[in-house]
Image: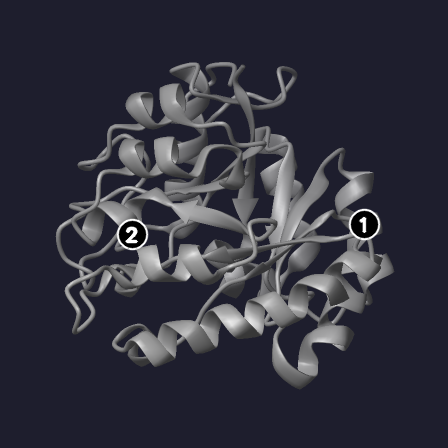
Amino acid sequence: MTRPIAIQLYSLREEAADDLDRTLSRLAQCGFLGVECADLHGCSPAEFRGRVADLGMEICSAHSMAVGDAAAAALDTVAQLGTSLAVVPFAAPDRFATADGVDGVAAELNTALPIAQERGLSLAYHNHFWEWTVLPDGRLAFDRLLERLDPAIGIELDVYWAQTAGRNPVALLDQLGERASRLHLKDGPADDPGAAMTAAGTGAMDFAAVAAADQAAWHIIELDRCETDMFDAVEASYRYLTRAGLSRGRPDASADDTGTPL
């Protein structure tokens, strides 16, 4: 089954900060079915949810630092957005350099899980590249993290960062199965964490292999940075993934800048 396509709004953080309504409208016109929030840009959760819904999109998930003392308040906000999944987007690289550091990350997430569940939410963790640091005992930090996480905690797999870390995204998808309910898709050389990212289909990633292996509920485009106009890169990513039949957008979306129906 082809997965619906969303955008992580962190990609367009500057555009959304300047004009949220224009940004959301352009994404809806392009054909996106969902958004994943990282910042509400001054809106209440109910107001943000309404603006997205009015454009025919949904909030597929939300990034939230829902750990530690902030967990309850952060998860209240996610619940009010009307989505079912809160994604913890980050844990510092140095925490994956030692076994104790990894165990601390797992403990924080495990503690947050019942708080999320009380609000009707699922919880997941989003990777970068440093989760595959080799620990002093020779094992990968990511493997230790998975062993210590409650199995109910998902992984929002960023396949680009995984490949940049030297891992095979398809093998990871086979390992994670339905636990990887959201995928982050970006492109680029995938061999240097400092390299600029590019639109999907213009770099080293094999998205056809990823789409054939995944069991995700959503595909989510995210570019942390790029050297071209970010909106152009986001829209080019949408066109590539939907025209190749790898992701599913809105069939009645407007024409792109060449006049070709999306």
Residue 192 x %, y %: 14, 57
Q: Amino acid at mark 2?
A: Trp
Q: Which mark is residue 210?
A: none
Q: Nearer the viewer, residue 145 or 67?
A: 145
Amino acid beneath label 1: Gly
Residue 202, by quadrant, is: top left
Where is residue 180 drawn, in percent x and y?
49, 40
Query: Looking at the image, which residue is at 27% across and 65% down?
Result: 130
Which residue is drawn at the image coordinates 69% and 65% (left, top)? 40
Residue identified by numbered label 2: 161
**x, y percent for residue 39:** 63, 66
* Residue neighbourhood size for the residue with mark 2, other residues' Cα within 10 Å, grouped as few (<14), some (14–19), many (≥20): many
Q: Residue at x 19, y 64 (%)?
A: 194
Q: Which element is circle 1 on? A: loop
Left or right: residue 227 versus residue 77 is left
Q: Residue at x 62, y 15 (%)?
A: 251
Secondary-structure class at tag 2: helix
Q: Is residue 105 left or right of residue 81?
A: left
Residue that badge 1 annotates: 82
Q: CA distance from mark 2 to mark 1?
A: 28 Å
